[in-house]
Amino acid sequence: MNSSISQVVPLELAEHSYDISIGYGLRNSLAEILAQWNQGQQWVVLTQKAIFDLYEPVIEQLKHAGYKIDTIIVPADESAKNIRHAEQVWTQMVEMGCDRSSILLALGGGVVGDLGGFVAATYMRGIGFIQVPTTLLAMIDSAIGGKTAVNLAAGKNLVGAIYQPKAVLVDPGFLQTLPRRNVISSLAEAIKYGFIRDKSIFDTMQARYDDLVSLKDEALLSEIIAKSCNIKAQIVSNDQFENGERRLLNYGHTIGHAFETIQAYGGLYHGEAVLYGMKCANFISHKKGLLNDSEFEAAQTLLHRFDLPELGQVPADKVLAVVAHDKKNINGKLNFILIDGIGNGVVSTDVTSDDIVDSLQAVT
């Protein structure tokens, strides 16, 4: 194992299996780590300008090691995730001489990973891609599991494919340059795992929230990342195409995605919207008797510690209209994720419009 890799989390999917490698300083060994896939073909780094400006040396090391590599820059926000930008990337790849042997390296957060995966899944009917996430949210969630997508005006992630990367390379050192707001938003996906599967993550975040947000304790951060990656890998291995257990990963996302859609992806960060969505999901879980009073109070108290911007105007009728088009609707029934006690996510088909409206009134 490369000396910069401290932990490896396998994701078992038969011929589509791959490793999630975790290690501080991993980005400085990319040329060595990626060598097994480099056979002289064209590589493309998909990234954003701010990331490129910070980490151009990471790309230069690959060039110096003999990789044939070019860079494509996309917008720095959710607006990049649409068909128009995907087409622009496809066109640039044609101009660069990319063929079916080419590999796309997604260097960035969830937007870059989602768009890059979608582009890789569709360019010449599929080329290889590798995830190098630079945000905590991407490291523990969006870069893992092969979900790729772009947005429509009608809703988030409505067009996409399940397409697995060849590898996910996680360097927690990337996080040191992130603004506090981005870190807080990203922690939403970590606490999600604490709510739906592993109460020890919830307990750790209760006890050491400030240490996590400050990113100063490398061992603590690595522990949370590794636990989160293990949970995501296990769930995806069991249910790659979201026919059952994988739906649990949508905890907080059904209403959270509605908030993002209503704000045209230009207001709340994804994790912030999901944190609000978790508050709603917990309210409904409590209303239906799945969370007792003390658990509900503990859950909401922890979520209130996250410093979130004002939610703004989210009319209930608009939320319900977006939820009606949610991907988790099957045969007219919404598969809504609740928690039956902290650490135990469940899929419910009994959440009504009235439940959603009540939750909005309670948390907004």
Image: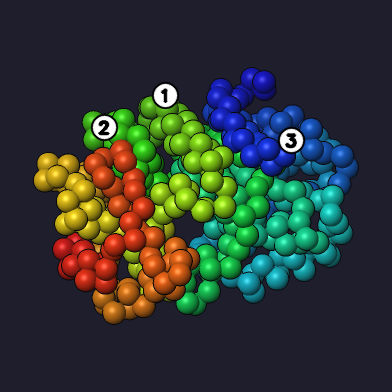
Q: Secondary structure at mark 1?
A: helix
Which quadrant holds residue 30?
top right
First in sequence: mark 3 vs mark 2: 3
For mark 3, what is the residue?
34
**Which amino acid lies under the numbered mark 3 shown in the image of this protein?**
Leu
Mark 3, Cα crowd under 10 Å, few <14 / some 14-19 / many 20+, is: some
Q: Are marks 3 and 2 in contact (CB under 8 Å)?
A: no
The amino acid beneath tag 2 is Asp
> Which residue occupies 19% across, 46% down?
291
- Sort mark 2 into few (<14), some (14-19) or many (20+) by Cα contacts within 10 Å: some
Residue type at tag 1: Ala
**Which residue is rendered at x = 67% and y = 22% of the image?**
2
| Residue beneath the point at 26% across and 75% down | 316
On the image, the x and y values in percent for residue 11 come to 59, 36
Q: Secondary structure at mark 2?
A: helix
Of all residues, the one furthest to the left in this rendering is: 293
Residue at x-position 24% and y-position 41% = 341
Closer mark to the observer between disc 3 and disc 2: 2
How far is disc 2 from disc 1 in space, using C-alphas? Answer: 16 Å
Precedes in sequence: disc 2 or disc 1: 2
- Quarter of the image for residue 308 reads bottom left
Q: Nearer the viewer, mark 2 or mark 1?
A: 2
Residue at the extreme front: 331
| Residue 324 sits above or below residue 169 on the image | below
Q: Which residue is mark 1?
A: 219
Judging depth in this view, the residue of 44 and 317 nearest the camera is 317
Q: Secondary structure at mark 3?
A: helix
Question: Label 1 crowding class (10 Å Cα cut-off): few <14, some 14-19, many 20+?
Answer: few
Can you identify the residue that label 2 sits on? 203
- Is residue 149 placed above or below 138 in the rendered structure? below
Question: Is 59 positioned to the left or the right of 136 in the image?
Answer: right
